[in-house]
Amino acid sequence: MRVKVVHDDINAGGGSERLAIVTIDLLAEMGFKVDLASFNKPNIEELTKDFGDIADSFDINPIPVDLFSMLGMTGSSSGSSSSQDMSGTKDRQSNTSTDKTVLVNTYSNDEEYDLIVNTHGDLLPYCNQTDDSSEINKKRIITYCHFPLVPQLLQQGNNNSQGYMRFLSRWLKVDDIEQDLKEKTLENVSKTYDLMIKNTTVLTNSNFSKRAIEQRYGPTVKPAVIYPPVDVERFCKIALRSGGRENIILVISRFSPDKQLENTIEIGKILINELKIDAKIILVGNIATEDHQYLEELKRLIGEYNLDNNFTVKVGISFEHLLELMRKSKVYLHPLAGEPFGISIVEAMSAGLIPVVPDEGGYTEFVPEYYQFHTHQQAADIIGKILIASDNNMQAERTQLSESVSKFSTESYKAGLRKVIEPLLSSKSSGPSSLAA
């Protein structure tokens, strides 16, 4: 059996990348030969650094994809030779260049696969516009949509669409796209995305995201909730009962404007300068080249508030270093409202940190209401109470929170995904022509 897994850049180091890796691991366990359709080759060293030994047995065949053909625009990139190959493309987390490869139509060999799984269906549309056999696609293509971001970004105004265009431009290999081509590209993104959601088997990460998909696409689209995989056992075992926790507030996030990390600084200002709580706030995460200016702006704001002694920024740290920070920290702060799930929140809770999160998002389904905030002031007040509480009094709470997220384990995710895949394979084997391309 053959399967194609679709993901834009598995080296990016985020939660969707971990989901992609675990998905590939399950497919290998089920006997599939896995091809990874991506814009960048996997960097095993970086994957292991980000996710621990989960990537040790990572065995896939990488195949390059062309974004223009993915959007039904083959030929639109004429005049820009760089958009037709992967030479010179850099992995986000390394300096490893991909081999120069002549790209073919992204969908040209789809009929050779028993299954296609798109693990980045929030931002990356994958659905052949020329194939309107929706029932065939629903039996052959699985889309894991963390949240229906593309329609939201394209509808919210010019600034958001420009931001999404920058995301696409990274893979179009075109530095400066003419306005008419930008418009055509976004038009085709929207069309392909809608086809994908309507004509494939859609999975998502929370009831929050499920409602958003249903509100956008109506009752004919019925996404199934399969919570993303979190290595809760490892975090629990290593960090839950660690002694000597310090007044450290941990934040784990990509350093990107869409993550709104400036909220962390505003909360820290109230906590430290106004409530006079002595605390350290550590920001941990990966960063893309285009976001370094945003990181410098965060550092400027920290200095403006005279918080240099309280804030520490750590970029690209190892998995072991992250675990050590979790052993020491008391609070996990999530600054972004409306996050569809929040894998790092579950990891922190497993490790015994007390989560403090906004009152809107998928994480409200598993974080107690009394740790949710609506304003920066409320967040600072909640954190202050946690930091001044006795460690002995908080240990039972840490244990209870850790146990409450055990349902988000890697094995639970695999079991849920297997239940989706097996009936699709059965329907194919029951009728030789049922999945004919």
Image (cartoon, rainbow, N blue to C red):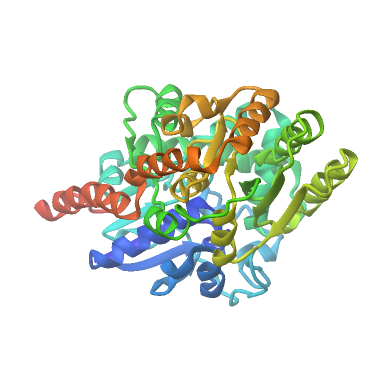
Point out residue 204 in the picture as x, y percentages from the top left corner.
39, 39
* Residue at the (34%, 46%) spot, across then down: 406
Left or right of 370 on screen, residue 278: right
- The answer to which of 334 and 3 lies nearer the viewer is 334
User: Residue 300 sits in which quadrant?
Assistant: top right
Taking the spot 53% from the left edge, 26% from the top edge, the residue there is 360
Residue 255 can be seen, yes or no: no
Q: Estimate the x, y position of residue 266 in percent, counting from the top left.
A: 76, 33
Quadrant, the N terminus: bottom left
In terms of depth relative to the viewer, which is nearer, 419 or 402?
Answer: 402
Side (left or right) of 272 relative to 409: right
Residue 94: tell me if it is visible: yes
Determine whether 83 is above or below 359 in the image. Answer: below
Residue 156 % position (x, y): 64, 26
Residue 355's place in the image compared with 17, above or below, is above
Compared across the picture, whether 305 is left or right of 107 comes to right
x and y percentages locating residue 308 in the rendered image: 84, 48
Please state which of residues 207 and 119 is positioned toward the viewer in this rendering.
207
Which residue is at a point 68% across and 50% down the rendered structure image?
Answer: 283
Furthest-bottom residue in this view: 99
Left or right, residue 217 beside residue 1: right
Please name whichever residue, 287 or 76, is drawn nearer the observer in this view of the structure: 287
